[in-house]
Image: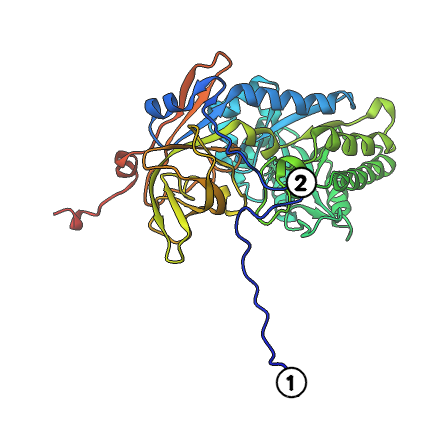
Amino acid sequence: MTKLRYERPIISKINAGVPDKFGMKTSVETLNQIDTVPVKDILEQYGSPVFVVSEPTIRKTYEEATSAFTSRYPKVQFAWSYKTNYIDAVCRAFHKLGSWAEVVSGFEYQKALNNGVSGNEIIFNGPDKSDEDLKLAIENLSLIHIDHFDELYTILKLAETTDKRPKVAIRVNMNTGIYPQWDRFGFNYENGEAWQALNRLMYSEKVDVVGLHTHIGTYITTPNAYSVAISKLAELATSLKKKFNHAIQYIDIGGGFASKNTLKGAYLPGKDTCPTFDAYADAITGALMSANFAPNELPTLIIESGRALIDDAGYLLGTVLANKRLADGRRSTILDIGVNNLFTSFWYEHEVLPVETTTQQTEDTTLYGPLCMNIDVVRAAVQFPLLQKGDKVAIRRVGAYNMTQWMQFITFRPNVIMIDEEHNTHIIRKAETNATFEAQEVIPEYLKS
Ligand SMILES: *Cc1c(COP(=O)(O)O)cnc(C)c1O
């Protein structure tokens, strides 16, 4: 008997439409209005593609988040994470609701001031603060969260040149059971660096150590990681109290709450797996209240949530440019929405919905953007109905990290509009034009003729 021939196993990609444990979806959802404003009207008035931000959704989400925390803990303050979406109208919508500003650069710091946030309600994070930035932040009594020893020494030096006492906190990184551990920002807890930094600041007597900060990562789906983080920060706070008889004013737990978007490769949709604000609040406030703070020295809890507060409020509307068959027969639909404007399509499987009712007949489809680049894929594989050139589509949950991380590439960035509480629409960022670029570029004399 001859030996059976060995056949090498092959791994092939799973295509769209494979049933999960809930079976196959049978109906095609559509999205034809946002806050009662017809999507078709928005596209007609503001062009295609267009970003839409819903102020009622911002408010609703914010109220949900704040009430989860304030119902469990007496002293809570939210600070809007500028880099998540720093279009001024969006920031102002959060400030109107009572949010402070959380910034990570001189540029964002200026934006917060221009948006009317008072200096002592700006939290200045990040590894890149110039001497000029720090001077201004010290003058304005902003909360400076120190990232590394070089910054710490700069602040101590600057403190000698002013009569203001800098208000500082340190950012602490630590093992919370989250992998990969974010250890590139701040001072490490486990190796004693954080405690050394605090000692250095306290012995200097030149600054006010007002708080402790951490930001353990982003899209964290295990609330328990926050309990671990709080207990470690609380331990530092109790040590400060014991050694220096110094009580801090706040603990800033950072951001990182997941949004309802689905990560690439996830088995279940994000909207079914994303922890609720209540779950995060339970983990955080539970750990805070079990710590050894005297009742009259309970620190304020600061939260810098970004994506979880804004993702749902953002939409990207666009138009089908063409359909074609790929060489292997698969259907591809080309949209005027590309990865240049939808940066998060690199890690999310965004929900793309037809605007008008279509047939219920779907087919395995790849959704491409308009760029002349192979990477321009909005969805690699999705069960999608046949849309025709000119048909409209809407993409949900794009409020976070798109209107800041978008790139100018091959085409312009589009209009961004806001729908207010009365359902009126307003342009909040104008589409770019050729003039936008002409204003920035300089042609040397010798190339002019
Ligand atoms: C980016 C960032 C946030 C917001 O993070 P999300 O994951 O969007 O909630 C908060 N704090 C700091 C320091 C950040 O860098």
For label 1, the SS is loop
Horizontal side of 169 relative to 370 (left or right) equals right
Residue type pointed to by label 1: Lys
381 w.r.t. 75: above or below = below
Residue type pointed to by label 2: His
Q: Quadrant of residue 59?
A: top right
Residue density around tag 1, few if under 14, some if 14–19, many if 20 or more, within 10 Å:
few
For label 2, the SS is loop
Residue 201 in view of the camera: yes
284 w.r.t. 7: above or below = above
* Colour scheme employed for the rendering of this structure: rainbow
Residue 117 in view of the camera: no
Mark in front: 2 vs 1: 1
Q: Residue furthest left?
A: 449
Q: Position of residue 197 (x, y in %)?
A: 73, 45
Q: Residue furthest front?
A: 1
Residue density around tag 2, few if under 14, some if 14–19, many if 20 or more, within 10 Å:
many
Pick whichever, 133 or 282, lies toward us.
282
Pick whichever, 205 or 180, lies toward us.
180
- The residue at which mark 2 appears reads as 215
- The residue at which mark 1 appears reads as 3
